[in-house]
Image (cartoon, helix red, strand yellow):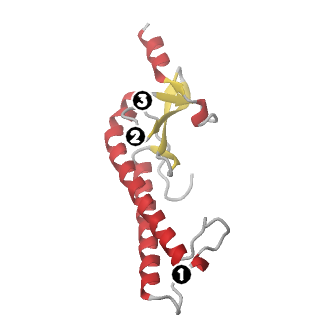
Amino acid sequence: MAAGRSPVRVLTIEQANALVPELGRRVAELLLRSGRVHGLVGELQSRAPTATAEPGGHVVDVTMRPGDSSEIRRLKRDIAEGVRGIRRGWSEVEELGAVVKDPRTGLVDFYGRVDGRLVCLCWKHPETSIEHYHELDAGLAGRKPLTDVRARTLN
């Protein structure tokens, strides 16, 4: 386990679903914040094209430079603050017991059990409940509906 990480929690489907309203609010806000930061990055890149450190713009240098205008300094400060807030927000999502799989799309898993096996209960913004699961190594493409599990449980 990495330093600062919460221990893995295994939740029932009901426990995970009880977290969805709070999870939905938090993830929606984080996606909005991310959009704002991406907008600021685009603005910075248009005003200071050398602010990108990697082809494709995947890394943005927000180091304050002596020649930066006050507007560039403000953009860099706002981007850095925005990124810190987003990281803090995703850490808070993880503290709920979630495993963040794709912060760009709001894809989150919870560890759960199906038929006695450890699986990922899979949720993606803006779903209103957890209706899918997948094997630990399968990912989003391997999602299966929980309706099959519920039907077996009720029979």
Where is residue 120 drawn, in percent x and y? 53, 34
Give how far across and how far down residue 147 sits, in percent.
45, 19
The span from disc 1 to disc 3 (Cα, nearest Å) is: 45 Å
Q: Amino acid at mark 2?
A: Pro
Q: Residue drawn at (45%, 44%), measured in percent from left and top? A: 98
Q: Residue furthest bottom?
A: 66
Tell me the kind of residue under disc 1.
Answer: Thr
Q: Nearer the viewer, mark 3 or mark 2?
A: 2
The amino acid beneath tag 3 is Thr
Q: Is residue 29 above or below residue 18?
A: below
Can you tell which mark lies on residue 126?
Answer: 2
Q: Nearer the viewer, mark 1 or mark 3?
A: 1
| Residue extending farthest front | 46
Near mark 2 (Cα within 10 A), the count class, few <14, some 14-19 or many ≥20, is some
Q: According to the image, label 3 marks what residue?
A: 12
At x 64%, y 74%, the residue is 53
Q: Are marks 1 and 3 in contact (CB under 8 Å)?
A: no
Nearer-N-terminus badge (1/2):
1
Where does residue 22 sit, x and y in percent of width and height?
A: 32, 44
> Measured along the vertical axis of the image, is residue 33 above or below residue 109?
below
Circle 3 crowding by C-alpha within 10 Å: few under 14, some 14–19, many from 20: some
Q: Residue at x 50, y 45 (%)?
A: 99
Q: Is residue 66 positioned above or below 117 on the image?
A: below
x and y, in percent, of residue 92 in the image: 40, 54
Residue situated in front as seen by the camera: 72 or 138: 72
Per the model, the C-alpha gap separating discs 1 and 2 is 35 Å
Residue where numbered disc 1 is placed:
63
Between discs 1 and 3, the one toward the N terminus: 3
Question: First in sequence: mark 3 or mark 2?
Answer: 3
Element class at badge 3? loop
